[in-house]
Image (cartoon, coloured by chain):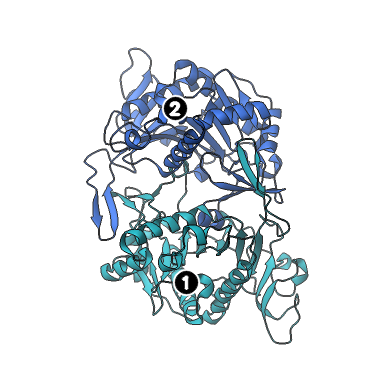
Chain colours: A blue, B cyan
Amino acid sequence: MRELRKDPVLGRWVIISTDRGRRPQDFHADYDHFAGFDPQHDPFREGQEHLTPPEIYAVRAKGSEPNGPGWQVRVIPNKYPALGIEGDLNPRGYGLYDRMNGVGAHEVIIESPDPYMLLSDMPLKHLIEVFSTFRLRVEDLSRDSRFAYVLVFKNHGRDAGASLRHSHSQIIATPIVPKRVLEEMYGAQEHWKNKRRSIFVDIVDQELMMQERIVYQNEEMLAICPYASSSPFEIHILPKRQRSDFRKASAEELSALAETVQVCLRKWRGALGPMQYNFLIHTAPNDTELSGVRQYFPMLDAYYCWHLEMFPRIAQTAGFEWGTGYYINPTPPEDAADFLRGIKVEIS
Amino acid sequence: MRELRKDPVLGRWVIISTDRGRRPQDFHADYDHFAGFDPQHDPFREGQEHLTPPEIYAVRAKGSEPNGPGWQVRVIPNKYPALGIEGDLNPRGYGLYDRMNGVGAHEVIIESPDPYMLLSDMPLKHLIEVFSTFRLRVEDLSRDSRFAYVLVFKNHGRDAGASLRHSHSQIIATPIVPKRVLEEMYGAQEHWKNKRRSIFVDIVDQELMMQERIVYQNEEMLAICPYASSSPFEIHILPKRQRSDFRKASAEELSALAETVQVCLRKWRGALGPMQYNFLIHTAPNDTELSGVRQYFPMLDAYYCWHLEMFPRIAQTAGFEWGTGYYINPTPPEDAADFLRGIKVEIS
């Protein structure tokens, strides 16, 4: 099977080509996350709070002191931030070129006090705290009018870009709206102009009707292997109802999201073995002058929908992907979803 | 130093952030390309031509037979092609979604009969044959009106996407113009509309004037670490004169390109040690109805310029890059170019 498929939101083409390995066992990873790990030098574990910058926020036992033990989820500034919190953007030219100061925020969410606790193993109640912390930090950082966008993402494993083993996620607030998100916004706006409907709701409806790419669903959320998946076993989790803004996610929606992520991570592990992965949350940009939302996307709430994208790091990107912006995916998403549905997991 | 820089062609922002490692020794790779390699089972070596599909083209000694020994550069169909050569596109809908048949071409250029010969070690005369073969194959594949684009690219090393050790490059012909190339075309067209100049020529002029990011130059070619480099030690090689179409490159231009690539690969190795890398050649799309060039970019020859992009695989992309389409680069291109200029290499 060789097919070109177009992502309905991004307009990006993907090559689905099954000549090379495509079944889960062809990708089976035996990634040993804790090989060589020494928890004595783990700056993220409980009791070693002095090894990190002072905390920004924590879910804590009543009566416990900031920057001491007694926490469940802890948020700190990144010690090596990609963007710095101080100063103004000061955009300026340099001959032909454009530049501005690297102003933004870069935080780390330590997801558990236990150095050996993986996100996929966490009790659901704890996972809900993690996702509630994501929402809270995005909301708080959005108040800074210098930031046009706040991105939550997770790198699990060295090949996925993580330098520390202790389970953590990151948040970066940027003064410009990311290219990928802009592309989604333009794609969704085009659909809205033509049909007066949210393309995300149309996708949810079609996937529920076709029943070919569903991995899991509950009352609030739908997890699918997207039609134009760019990598094998990629999963997108979408709210079933039109919701532009992750900051406004309700307690029920956050619980449903955490449950869906837990199920998907456990199904992945059942299908692929222990492996490295990334996830990220796309939401509407901040409604500031800099983000351009008010001016160029005044109806954004009607047609943009926040969602979570997760993908295992089991395929290499190479010169072709870099040179084209297209992807070659050896596993049709229908096959991936079918395998994943067949993996039984417990919610706990 | 933390700075946001905008790519003048793509419009993409890059974060230059030097808090983490930035000097070449921080990236120093000790990649052993031939670890575990068994040339007995190498399908690309001279004398084992029967292990590959029949050749499409070869640079051969006079009197030698096709698919036997006596060649210098050999082009074969990829045994596991991402796109298949037979059939029509047959574009069609699937509910909300769009798809078409995976029609295209996927060839492998075996760069040398010697299993242990790396591109960086090849005599310049041989390297010129390799680049002349690239040009010839792009020209030939462009004659098929089903193909909108022909991309030449190289993956060196497993992390860069190569599954075989014997030095080789690839060519993929696609029925659609790649997203990345379209973005370059739109960016260059915008500049043309405003200034009636080629942005690529403007970049060459500014870089020659500023002298900050030049790695190497000769009569025809300029190698720079681009202003908004997305990865450390990335190099772009541009013709000094406006040339839209790689298919029309002259013998002098191909020799100058091969020389520049040789110098850059050797400077990389001097600065970073043996490492994995990718390169690719961007050229104007085929002038077919499908590519849309005639309709949307009638003046393309005046403002698009073919070029070669090369980047070592020394930094990990992670959730942030995937989620945003932006890149975090720990090495300012001025520093990278300065280090590379300091590495003396011989052209041979």
State which quadrant residue A231 falls in.
top right
State which quadrant residue A319 falls in.
bottom right
Residue under label 2: A302
Front disc: 2 or 1: 2
The x, y position of residue A111, in whole percent, is 45, 27
Circles 2 and 1, Cβ within 8 Å, touching? The answer is: no
Q: Is residue A274 above or below residue B317?
A: above
Q: Is residue A155 above or below residue B117?
A: above
Q: Secondary structure at mark 1?
A: helix
The x, y position of residue A180, in whole percent, is 45, 42
Q: Secondary structure at mark 2?
A: helix
State which quadrant residue A338 falls in.
top right
- Can residue A45 be seen here? The reply is no
Asked if badge 2 and badge 1 are on a common chain, one would say: no
Q: Amino acid at mark 1?
A: Val
How far, Cα to Cα, is label 2 from label 1? 50 Å
Specify few, some or many for label 2: CA neighbours under 10 Å numbering under 14, 14-19, or 20 or more: some
The x, y position of residue A73, in whole percent, is 41, 24
Residue under label 1: B261
Q: Residue at x 50, y 70 (%)?
A: B245
The disc placed on residue B68 is none
Letter of the chain that mark 2 sits on in the rendering: A
The x, y position of residue B85, in whole percent, is 70, 60
Q: Is residue A189 left or right of residue B152?
A: left
Q: Nearer the viewer, residue A170 or A211?
A: A211
- Can residue B228 be seen here? The reply is yes
Q: Residue at x 69, y 68 (%)?
A: B76
